[in-house]
Image: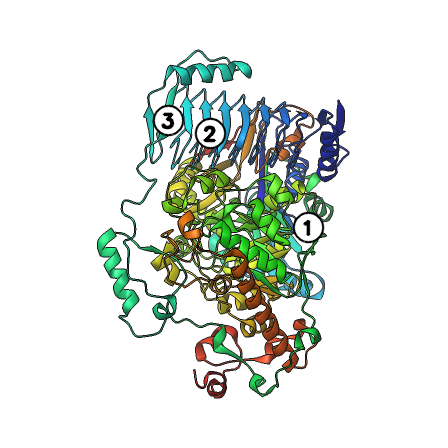
Amino acid sequence: MASIDLAVVPVRAANERLRQLGAAGEDIEILNPDARHHIGVGLVHPVTVHIRGSAGYFCAGLTDGPRFVVDNNVGWGLADNMLKGSIVVNGNASAIAGVAIRGAEVIVKGNMGSRAGQVMKAGTLACAGNANFMAGYMMYGGRIVILGDSGDKVGQDMTGGTIYVGGRIVALGTDAKVTDLSSADDDELRAFLDRYELPFRGTFQKIVNAGKNLRYGKTEPRVRVIPYFEASEANGYWNTKVREDIEVKAQIGRYRIRGYGAARPLPHISDLAFRTDLTAIPADPSVVDKVRMRTLLGGRSGAKPLDLSMPVMIAPMSYGALSKSAKVALAHASRLSDTSENTGEGGLSNEQREAAKQIIYQCLSGRLGWNIHDMHRANGLEIYISQGAKPGLGGQLMAKKVTKEIARIRGIPEGIDLRSPSRHPDVLGADDLVIKVEEFREATGYRIPVSVKLGAGRVRDDIKIAYKDGFDFVELDGLQGSTGAAGNEVLEFVGIPTLSAIQEAIDALSEIGAADKLPIVLMGGVKDGIDAAKVLALGATATAVGTSAIIAGGCIACLQCHVGNCVTGIATQDPVHERRYNVPVEAQNIHRYLEAVRWQLASVAHAHGYADVRQFKREDLVALTPEAAAITRLPYDPSLRERDRGGR
Amino acid sequence: MCGIAGIMFKRNGKDAEVGKALISMLDGVQHRGPDSTGFALYYEPQEGHYRLRFYVGEGDAAAATIERIREKLQDHQARIVEQHNVGCTYAVIVQFHGDLQRFAYDMEHVAKVFSIGESLDIVKDIGGAHDVDDRYKVANFQGTHGIGHVRLATESDVAPDASHPFWATGFADVAIVHNGQITNYWKMRRRLEKRGFAFNTDNDSELIAVYLADKLSQGWKLEAALKESISDLDGTFSFLVSTKDEIGYAKDRLAAKPMVMLENDDMIAIASEEVSLNRLFPGQALNTFEPPPGTFKTWHRSI
């Protein structure tokens, strides 16, 4: 057995060594752990690791296969997202023990802190002592065994899985119920406890989901399609969309869920203009070769940056909201245009990975489809805090789209109206987030950039936190971004416009002396290369396109993404509909659109006499409306309105 | 955005190594807040004497500020018994018998007050626990109890006066360290301002301190005030409060922020993470305890 003494070896070096020893099949003991964080993170070999003392946060996190033993206590997030393998803690575990596990066996011989087993998918979390507040909170599967008392609100909002309580059930959480325990359940449980030498002579009570909150009572009715372009036109106070919305509410008796984003006029990028008259510049067919656009993104802390041929990426959209075919087409187009794809919430499929040259892998609150192996095969990692279309809310995926395959990759029960948690189990402040970011870096040997996706809300504060927490870049998403499903009022009224978002972000970074030190990828309603150029001039390092990319790939913008019957085969999981989607053709369409964006971006730069897109600056722009001027503090110049909007 | 720590010794009389213990504990959680570090320390009170520590900055401006502080002290018939200009602060001990709240609010007009108390002294500055110790010799402090804080500056500058702990402006001897965010901050603040209390920062930790000190001044027991705070304060929080004789904690109902404690016959030690407690007992297995959500507790010093 090899020994690593944390009194002399830093955790980062210890984890590198652990992985080497693991690969060589050697068992390891850790001396003087001193409750340090991230011990054993990222280990994927079936070796034994004996921690002789207490461990800190995320002990054995993001692992697959090893067997851990901890002599004393552990901190937050024990065995975070552990796939296979086991961990036995001889003392107590702090909050969120067994968070998001997907098959591991996690044994705590003492007591567990709050929210044990939050968003777990499979495996067993067993505790010989008492659990605490909200054990099994939002669990999707697997089982929790508590030999002592359950703690308050046990099984709060559990979707699947089982909780067995040997002591007293203090109080059941929302949508949890006690059900009969079969003798087969009991035998299996006791065999498990014997295996881990956990003596128990009492009787168990079994808690499962009560099934009251898994689906909306009524689903959205079929409606005559009003295309987004019509819905978002400024045609007065009462319009077709408002009427439709009222009619839908009259049928379902609750807020209405729909796809796409805000459909009302808001200050936006098109309210800005370049001072230079772009129409006066003659078209130059070889302009793309005359302007440097290559952008390296995410190398700020030594990771291998994304290498983009232009500062335009594909925005995060999930496999789940979109069909696999649509995701593959986007991935392939991103390869053809030599930029990057993004998984969104739903995990990384092999087909996406193969089709994309570079892909960012997103980690969300529910940890759906999240695992160490896909982290390793990503080119960038992204912690999703929120998105522009629905800041403060988690993803939504209606039952029709939660097919067997989608449920499998996400690790959730099939056929539920999936409402992802609104916040991460282990990120409840900037201080926790630092520790989370470091867990990802430890797990991937500091080789992959880690970014954060922020829906524009409290941008000024959030961007400072992102900088302080050492993210490699920020994906900042404004209100004009779209989504696969969200409440109509949320889409229309919750977010902050994209223009405000970038201005607040740039101001905030200046305030803390960090201007130009944190790259910002601005997204949310960017439709072409002119918008992209303006976004760069406002201070963003890059932009990302989502809505426009899927429109290029065949989307008809009918706002019905949530339904799951997308006629184009994009926003559906139904094979009948998906069959209509011609992946190679649509990949070419998206690619051609991206090339048009590239050409426009180059042309605008060239028209300014720039040889590099990084030369765009604020002074290149004016505001066409008083609102846009107030938001951006750019000079208000209505005289250019005629020039830029004439004839439109 | 931070890490917190607190300790009360039960047996070592008035001479326990509180300074050294807090330095080790805060150094242990420095990863939660590398920007600044602070300590609230409690000296043995002397009848009719108050300790004041001001933020004065450095250089000529500091000298001018100190001069203004002295004049203002004279205006209030506060006689200087002892004075030191250390780091970016000016610390004095004065004899004073008037209305403390008026005195405190008035002194704030001259310079930022870090703390006022018969026994409280708040030492805080940018840098880690050991950096601050180098400048202020916290390790020399002996007493019965104290609390401390490491800060990750996210919403305001890295500056000594934006560091924690915070004292309860206008109330002697009450200090707070807090990890979390009070979401009904403005509502609570307006409520307290209507009753005549002044706030010197927009920091929610100061609010908790004033909120509790107000209750104590109305004759509430600290324990009762903490219990009430869990209902009155909205948001995520784990905080430690200290007074001349007591130390206590409260935790929000969602258990959103961490806190680990260790109690034995010698001491009660509380921190954001177990690593701080481990520093007090290197290499030993500890029987630590995580306070459940929505709970509070106080300890009174034994002497």
Q: Amino acid at mark 2?
A: Gly
Q: Residue at x 61, y 49 (%)?
A: A354
Q: Does residue A240 appear to the left or right of B88 in the view shown?
A: left
Question: How many tags in the picture?
Answer: 3
Disc 1 target residue:
B127
Q: How far apart are labels 3 and 1 at the CA level?
A: 50 Å
* Of the two numbered discs 3 and 1 in the rendering, the one whose residue sits closer to the viewer: 3
Q: Amino acid at mark 3?
A: Ile
Which residue is at the front of the view, B61 or A588? A588
Q: Residue at x 57, y 64 (%)?
A: A591
Disc 2 target residue:
A142
Considering every residue shown, the one lying at the far left of the view is A250
Return the x and y of residue A275 as percentages of the image width and height: 57, 84
- Given the image, what chain letter belongs to the residue carrying mark 1? B
Q: Amino acid at mark 1?
A: Gly
Disc 3 target residue:
A207
* Of the two numbered discs 2 and 1 in the rendering, the one whose residue sits closer to the viewer: 2
- Given the image, what chain letter belongs to the residue carrying mark 2? A
One can see residue B205 in this view: no
